[in-house]
Amino acid sequence: MKKIVIIALLRLCAMVNAQVEIPSDSIKVTPLKEVIVSGDIRKDPAQVIIKSDYQNKVVQPKNSGQLFEDINGFSLIKRGNYAVEPSFRASQYEQLNIQYDGGTKAYHACPNRMDPITTLVNPEEVTRIEIIKGPFSVRYGTNFGGVINMVTQTGTLANKKIQGSISSGYESNGNSSVNMINLMSRINKFYIAGNLSYRDYGNYEDGNQNEIPSSFRNTGYGLKFGYDFNEKNSLQASFRQNFGRDVLHAGLPMDTDKDDSTIGSLDYKLTSNNNYFKGLHAKIYYSFVDHIMSNYRRPSFTNSEAIALVDATTFGGKLESEWNLGTNWKLFGGTDFVALSREGNRNRLVKRNMMGVLLPTPLAFEDKIWQDSYTNTLGAFLEARYFITEKASLTLGSRLDFVSSNAEDLDPTFAALYPNLEKRNETNYSGNISFKQYLPNHKTVEISYGRGSRSASIEERFIAFFNIGRDPYEYVGNPNLKAEVNNQFEISFNGKKFFEGKTINQINYGIATYYSIYENYILGVVDETLIRKYNPTTPPIHPKVFRNIDNAMKTGFETYLDVKLYNHFNFLTELAYVYTENKDFNENLPLTPPLQTRFKLGYETEKFWASVQYNLTARQPKISQSFDEIATPGYEVMDIKAGFSPLKNLSIGGAVLNVFDQYYNNHLTFAFNNQPDFGRTPITEPGRNFTLFVNYKF
């Protein structure tokens, strides 16, 4: 594997040093409300990645989290087959600002994150994903480790009174199916888009034919309505609901009985021809997640049955204006607001004592999970771009966040740890500066620094003696945590080279390297002065309390080389590596992925496409022992995908995933938890899987 990495890097260096004249190419501008990267160099943020081929070559991901699997620098955190979340450069959870359609947010209700935002949006709806690779913009909310915007379908592109598509997919591993219908219409100034989907997934088998508890059912629908008053004024409303049922989580202590979510948003956009004032964007949104989980299917049910009813309410909005200050200055200014509140308790019925003896009368308890807690964040921001020349620009941004938090129904044990607890107010500063230079022959270089700060999440502040991690510890929140800060430096270089020959048509290449210095990094740390509240004699007996650590860092790089051959072929090589360090504990930060290498050979014509992808994941010996991580062996996985269009508007795609039926586990995947046939070992990934996906457009 080391030879492969060296060869790929040498080939990249050769391309970087080449100096060949090439014709100029145009930039496609995408003026939609849902996007944050439009293709307009006067407006787009610094250090971005765009992935936009999700409507073609579908191989049926299970939820939107798995759309990130093939984006360089991303890894997946799995608790089973459903609650899948992205990790980018060893940043995850609230360290990433994940939103969709240009700012709509929804937060999970479950303390074990059974219901992240990636489960609330159907993957078939997503048309593109936009990523800001660090704290390099202040316009899209609190930005610690990056912004991820999932753009969904809209009726603005409809060109008929009624058009749409019907899709159906099947997976052999788990006997799983998905069905979906999309409709859209545009009549003069009014447009509408809607979708309805149903997914039914069974337990999958890993490479050793072990059946992994992972089944789930999900029904969802979404609607978008829009009205263009004229070319400069538009209004759009969206509404979606998802209903998850009987979701098995192999890596969590409970399963989901019910997970219902409702999300609504309203957008208004105004553009202006005024010399100075150029536009206004206003957004408001609301989400509510109603979640029920229990251990009724688990071994622990014989000793103590437990059910938790929790919910999360999110309300937010944004107002942003755009200004031209002379010929060389572009200014964006505005304010945004996010209010998140969580409620809910766990009800337990203890049937046996600690010696295992059946109690004559079960004992009933009610445990406070969220303690009726909330966080409110009001942000104000300014971001300016100065054009030094036509091909060189400087971006400057500043942001203030005013954060208030409190818990209004305290657990007595938690209240004893933090007497006189009351509403807390914080003020956080974030800022960024970036320089971008367009070089001759379709090359660009970008140098950026960003300071991203985020206040502690509700879990980190107020969770009350609850198991929420990959390890078996109870976790205790800390309302006095300082805001976490990421000081990130990044240099990126990208280029294109065109050829007139028939063999090689085009070469795209790039490299990005970064270094982050963390302040007040938040981690769960074992507190030996405390004893766990529930099952106090069961190891580990000391809970973890969230603390700030003083010295932590990360560094890494991503690189790619994409060669287009013979008009229809392309060969892609990608590498991603991140190194982290918790200097206080003399170990790595938790959830640090290993070196990942990807080779992909593709072929595409108007009616046929095929690809072979070979993923190499290195061994990860650098672990966080305090997080109960273990070294993960390396593995290699091959996927073969193909599709064709036998008739107009009809496309058929199929794949063989994990062709060689490899038995492996991802380093970021959770361990089996409270399962009858598995110890506390990492969850293994699906073995060989045949998939089929059919789509008909009308």
Image (cartoon, rainbow, N blue to C red):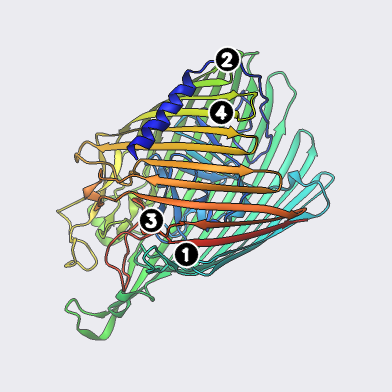
Residue at 34% across, 53% down:
462
Distance CA(mark 4)–CA(mark 1)? 49 Å
- Of label 4 and label 1, which has the lower sequence position? 1
Q: Where is residue 517 in the image (x, y as percent from the top left)?
A: 32, 30
Q: Which amino acid is tagged 4? A: Ile
Q: How crowded is mark 2: few (under 14 residues within 10 Å), some or many (20 or more)?
A: some
Q: Which of marks 4 and 2 is in front?
A: 4
The residue beneath circle 3 is: 408
Query: Decide: marks 1, 2 in contact (CB < 8 A)?
Result: no
The residue beneath circle 4 is: 507
Residue 497, picture quadrant? top right
Q: Which amino acid is tagged 3? A: Glu
Q: In this view, does 125 lie above or below 549?
A: below
The residue beneath circle 1 is: 291
Residue 9, picture quadrant? top left
Q: Which of marks 3 and 4 is in front?
A: 4
Q: Which of marks 1 and 2 is in front?
A: 2
Residue at 49% across, 38% down:
147
Distance CA(mark 3)–CA(mark 4)? 58 Å
- Of label 3 and label 2, which has the lower sequence position? 3
Question: 554 and 611: which one is in front?
Answer: 611
Q: Which element type, helix, strand or loop, lies under badge 2?
A: loop
